[in-house]
Image: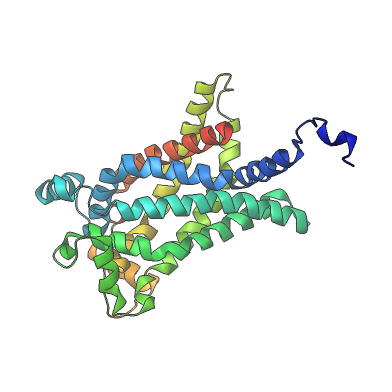
Amino acid sequence: MMDSGAHEKRPPILTSSKQDISPHITNVGEMKHYLCGGCAAFNNAAITFPIQKILFRQQLYGIKTWDAVLQLRRDGFRNLYRGILRPLMQKTTTLALMFGLHEDLSSLLQKHVSAPEFATRGVAAVLAGTTEAIFTPLERVQTLLQDHKHHDKFTNTYQAFRALKCHGIGEYYRGLVPILLRNGSSNVLFFGLRGPIKEHLPTARTHSAHLVNDFICGGLLGAMLGFLFFPVNVVKTRIQSQIGGEFQSFPKVFKTIWLERDRKLTNLFRGAHLNYHRSLISWGIINATYEFLLKVI
């Protein structure tokens, strides 16, 4: 005998659909700092790549801005964006890690370590910067692709990676020390000063005003840190422009550059003014894009 309730209509059960959706929402929330950082980096790299190439020539050869521009003109438009794939990959990944790991590690340390917040955030910034250094091979290859002395040896990222393979894994990480020094220190200052600087800016009452404040805050910090660590990047560029041979220490390479540039601080900082303006624009774009996406997602 069939159950009399078998033909009764039952309301659809929505519990399972909510259970299916909620984990996805949670995952997006957990990853939003990585996603926002990566998108901000992509946006910036596409806009400022030509300026970066001019700056690179000045760091490597100690030439004036106009001479670097003339070099790029002689190379032609075809080579202007030569090597952009690598910085797009590197910047997108490293800035995703920079912002994402800083937030995750800060939360983790604050839960398990009884220390002031500025201390835990400082440690998290150093650890995030250290993790970014995993991608040193990408920065290494960019240096080689932007140096016109290597134009006849390889024409793309894949060929540059193959050229280093015969020298061993250590060749991919040539220049690691200055990168670790730069990443850790700059991260601590960036995350530590970002909040206080924004607090001293005029109060933002509209979305556009918030965007402007975030651009100014990021730009000022980027310009300051870019100028402060400019000599470190000069040494890093010289170290990474070499293929094979002796692995020279940071102090030794710095001393060589110092002597080559007549022991003048102004010569060591040649190109720093362009780096200042590039960093002002780049980190303004990065910080404004990051904060905007953080509110939207």
Left or right placement of residue 22 versus residue 36 in this view? right
Q: Nearer the viewer, residue 5 or 255?
A: 5
171 is higher (above) or lower (below) than 204: below
Whether residue 254 is visible to the viewer of this picture, yes or no, is yes
Residue 264 sits in quarter: bottom left
Counting from the top left corner in percent of width and height, residue 275 is at 33, 46
214 is higher (above) or lower (below) than 19: above
Q: Nearer the viewer, residue 36 or 51?
A: 36
Q: Residue at the far top: name it.
A: 205
Residue 40 sits in quarter: top left
Counting from the top left corner in percent of width and height, residue 9 is at 80, 30
79 is higher (above) or lower (below) than 232: above
Q: Nearer the viewer, residue 41 or 124?
A: 41
State the quadrant of the C terminus. top right
Residue, x 30% and y 59% (percent of image)? 142
Residue, x 29% and y 51% (percent of image)? 84
Counting from the top left corner in percent of width and height, residue 133 is at 46, 63
Residue, x 50% and y 45% (percent of image)? 37
Left or right placement of residue 195 versus residue 133 in this view? right
